[in-house]
Amino acid sequence: MTATLSPQLNDTTAIGRVAALVVDHAVKRFNVADKRRPVMAIDDVSMRLERGEIYGILGSNGSGKSTLIRLICGLLTLDAGRVEIFGHDLVREELTVKRLINRVSVDAAFFKKLSPLENLSFAARLYGLEAGPARSATLEILARLGISARRADRPIEQMSRGMQQKVAIARALLTSPSLLLLDEPTTGLDPRSKLDVQAFIEELRVEHGATIVLTTHDLAEADRLCDRISILNDGRKVVESTPIGLKLLVAERYDQPATLEAAFMTYTGRSLDDDHEETEETDEPN
């Protein structure tokens, strides 16, 4: 059963208000050749995000975080349940939904021989953006993320992994998505670049009213950015609350330190160090 300190909202809450995102009893299974039964990757997960909210998803490697993001953006199909984006059903209104969302993943793909500017110009054409305004917006976003016009003309393959991740974020922001899905967006960034990206995420919410879903292993990042947080374990949502609510929950109910790390360990049975070691040894996706 999911623990929560905040009231669960449903589809009919607040007449006249349409949720930015509704995930309703989502289920996803994967068939694995050496196992008789399908692996349950997402097991009856529900959540509702209001407009302008930054919602964090935490969990150990293999908990289902990235699978859930891929389900929300339509890269994977649901086995059961439904997803709605601003009132539009993901399955029945796929094209409409895809105009409203964009995704940044830790393994973003590029045309490596092309420059950031060329990669983003290509993305702009796919979304039907005019070339002139798109170029201006591209340079502005890249500059805000610490990539100068001179660097924007160099091939992507000459950039560090952290710089490439910034370009992936810029590409997603270029389309001004109403719902932005950030799957570990600051992984591989140096501390200064990470702070730049976090500040930009906050600006997106304040200045553009974007709704953001964020998966991260950085608990300080989640504490800083997120209005509410869910923790997934073995594909199930085991707890949901505000960052302060999670800290109070583990302190009062489990007599643990009032920290997000204590909440993470309590609800996943693992420490962040264990999780990072497994990533280095197995390189398994989340």
Image (tube, grey):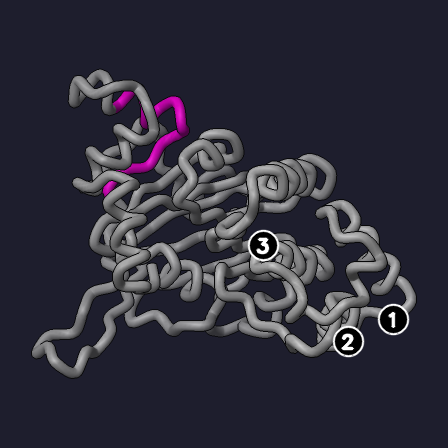
Q: Which residue is mark 2?
A: 125
Q: Is residue 211 left or right of residue 250?
A: right
- Other residues around mark 3 within 10 Å, as few (<14) / some (14–19) / many (≥20): some
Taking the magenta stretch, the answer to whether it contains residue 61 is no
- Other residues around mark 1 within 10 Å, as few (<14) / some (14–19) / many (≥20): few
Are discs 1 and 3 less than 8 Å apart at CB? no
Question: Residue 147's spot in the image, x, y percent?
Answer: 75, 52
Give the vertical position of 248 relative to 10 (above or below). above
Query: Magenta segment, which residues?
Result: 238-249
Are discs 2 and 1 less than 8 Å apart at CB? yes
Taking the magenta stretch, the answer to whether it contains residue 247 is yes
Q: Nearer the viewer, residue 47 or 277?
A: 277
Labelled disc at residue 162:
3
User: Secondary structure under badge 3?
Assistant: helix
Circle 3: residue type: Gly
Q: Residue at x 89, y 62 (%)?
A: 133
Question: Residue 108's spot in the image, x, y percent?
Answer: 54, 66
